[in-house]
Image (cartoon, rainbow, N blue to C red):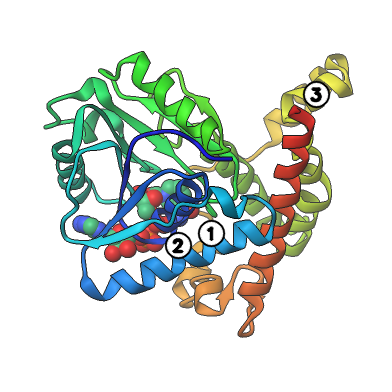
Amino acid sequence: MSAHFGRVLVIGGGAMGTGIAARLSAAGIETVVLVRRPEAAATTRDEISRRVEHLVELDAASPESVRAATVLVGEAPGPFALAVESIAEDMPAKRLALALAESLVSDDGIVATNTSSLRLADLAEGLTRPELFAGWHWFNPAELVPLVEVTGGPRTAPETLERLAALSRAVGKEPITLRRDHAGFVANRLQYALLREAYALVEEGVCGVADVDRAVVAGLGARWAAIGPFASMDAAGLDVHEAVAAQLFPQLSRSTEVPALLREARRSGATGMKGGRGLLGDYPPGAAREIATRRDTVLALLAEDRREAEQ
Ligand SMILES: NC(=O)c1ccc[n+]([C@@H]2O[C@H](COP(=O)([O-])OP(=O)(O)OC[C@H]3O[C@@H](n4cnc5c(N)ncnc54)[C@H](O)[C@@H]3O)[C@@H](O)[C@H]2O)c1
């Protein structure tokens, strides 16, 4: 796959910025990544290369289409056809990054944000061309998870959303375009609705955290990788679905608090795999990498399966 699109600027070389850059450069897009600190340049470059090589190893990109990304510190000469910011989730910092992005794109260039939770209407304040501003929400690992959510702010032109969705498809992503700016977009709301119930089940002593993960990996997730929740209900029969919904919906958690289990884990200093201890217990050195490798292998297999199904 080698996609045709103008130069793309990615602002921020963290987990998501490097993943986005890897996906774009693997698809042949001329990609520049802008980082703040000189000492970040080499690690960012290495991380993007690692991710691209991994895509090639997994057969999720062909070596011929790869166009190595450039990493620059502090400044990036424009113009760009698209500039996407993927820096820390902080409103003032993102507004500055978006103003910079707007100054570096061509007159019809798109300015995008990878925000997970900030309102596009607030982020767009101060932009001179809000019709060319959009949300472009990727999922970690960005180079491998097919979904991207494309979202407009109150003044985004429909054509901007169409162009961003078209680019997403051209680099091998599967975009959904939201009808309006909505906190958490679609996938995170679904994920957090499921997590709220998962915490409730564990806190009520119905099952353990590992059981929840097994129920999703061996049950719901396995099925949802093939057909989504609505298709699953169509398959089950809407009469059955209606009867179960009438029974279960009143019993599901409606908590609006951060779950006690999560608060306790945080109070005890747990940060998840990056710190060696999380909700599922301890992660010995190397365990996180092993889990990521398994996840990436499955993601690549699923993506290949979907590509074949589409042909
Ligand atoms: N991690 C995820 O799963 C995920 C998924 C979707 C979207 N996002 C969003 O993507 C964005 C980036 O998240 P991440 O997980 O890559 O974070 P990260 O901490 O890995 O990376 C953020 C990067 O931005 C840089 N940065 C911070 N402030 C900056 C500034 N003022 N100017 C320039 N660079 C700056 C940091 O040095 C770091 O390299 C956030 O908005 C986050 O909400 C994250």
Residue 126 picture location, percent across and down: 11, 32
Identify the residue position indicated by label 2 in the image. 48
**Secondary element at tag 1:** helix
- Marks 1, 3: nearer the viewer: 1
Image position of 205 with respect to 176: above or below: below
Q: Quarter-wise, where is residue 187 in the image?
A: top right
Say whether residue 145 is left or right of residue 129: right
Q: Residue 257 placed where, x, y %?
A: 47, 48
> Nearest the camera: 69 or 19?
69
Q: In the figure, 67 relative to 162: above or below?
A: below
Residue 4 rendering spot, x and y as whole percentages: 45, 33
Q: Amino acid at mark 3?
A: Met
SS at mark 2? helix
Q: Residues within 10 Å of mark 1 (few under 14, many from 20)?
A: many
Q: Residues within 10 Å of mark 2 (few under 14, many from 20)?
A: many
Q: Quadrant of residue 225?
A: top right
Identify which amino acid the numbered label 1 is placed on. Answer: Val
Q: Which residue is mark 3?
A: 233
